[in-house]
Amino acid sequence: MSLSLFSKWFFVMLVAFGSHQSNAQNSSTYELLDKSTGQTLTCLMCEPGYHLVQHCSATHPTKCALCNHGLYTEFWNFVANCLICDTCADNQVISHQCSPSQNTKCVCKEGYFWNRYFCQRHKVCGSGYGVKTKGTPYEDTECELCQSGFYAAGKPGHATCQQYTDCEKNGLITVLKGKIWHDAICASCDNVHKDGAEFLCGSFLIL
């Protein structure tokens, strides 16, 4: 366990222990034995963004200080030192800057998602597949195979399944039937005559 992780673990355990000892009606206090008097004192914890400088006594309240730049505490506490703010990992960007009361928040950059341990590049849907659900910083792209009568339209990784163009409905002829990876290709008889492909206006069709 790294020092940073150990510090955070210790901080959480200390806060939890202090909360367990605190007054049930006020979770921002903790109990402390005054060695000079033998009395049990109820001390006020430091609020988020602050750390403990001196425990309370029978004559003075708890003394706290604001966390310095690059350090933070997120909960009511009585820790002597603030925690070090996190830095974003590879392929992450800062979504919220660290402040005395909140740790740095990071999110995967465009085109990546968090897969529990690191930011992984979004899946690129293959030929004949469309994007069913676009990837986010938290979820991968979900792909779907285009069904009969549909093709993957758009750039790889961004294509969606769209219905073939109905050439005949638009008064054209089908030069090439659509496949799951491309649309039907249409043309007018006037154009195919100019190109010397008059036979396409007959009973023939390129499959």
Image (cartoon, rainbow, N blue to C red):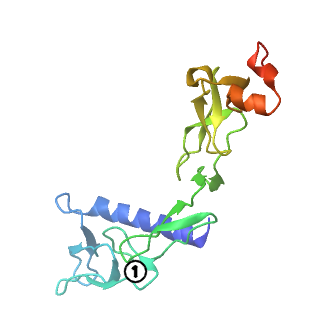
Q: At which x and y percent is residue 66?
A: 33, 84
Please state which of residues 42 and 64 is positioned toward the viewer in this rendering. Answer: 64
**Image-quadrant location for residue 63:** bottom left
Answer few, some or many: residues within 10 Å of disc 1's Cα (few below 14, many 20 plus, some between 14 and 19): some
Question: SS at mark 1?
Answer: loop
Going by the numbered disc 1, the residue's amino acid type is Ala
Seen in the picture, residue 131 relative to 110 is either above or below; the reply is: above
Location of residue 48 with respect to 205 vertically, above or below: below
**Location of residue 34 in the rendering, given as x and y in whole percent from the top left corner:** 26, 79
Q: Which residue is mark 1?
A: 80
* Quadrant hosting residue 194: top right
Whether residue 183 is visible: yes
Q: Give x and y (percent) for residue 45.
A: 27, 73
Q: Which residue is depicted at the point 23% across and 62% down?
A: 27
Q: Is residue 146 in view?
A: no
Quadrant containing the N terminus is bottom right
Please tell me which residue is depicted at 83% across the width and 30% down the height of the picture: 196
- Percent position of residue 35, x then y: 29, 81
Residue 190 or 41: which is nearer the viewer? 190
Up the image or down, 18 lies above or below 152; here it is below
Horizontal relation, residue 18 to residue 82: left or right:
left
Give above or below for 54 relative to 181: below
The total number of labels drawn is 1
Q: Quadrant of the C terminus?
A: top right
Query: What is the quadrant of residue 93 in the picture?
Result: bottom right
Instruction: Judge by depth and name the residue closer to the eye, 160 or 44.
Output: 160
Q: Decide if residue 116 is on the left or right side of residue 187.
A: left
Left or right: 36, with 93 as reference point: left
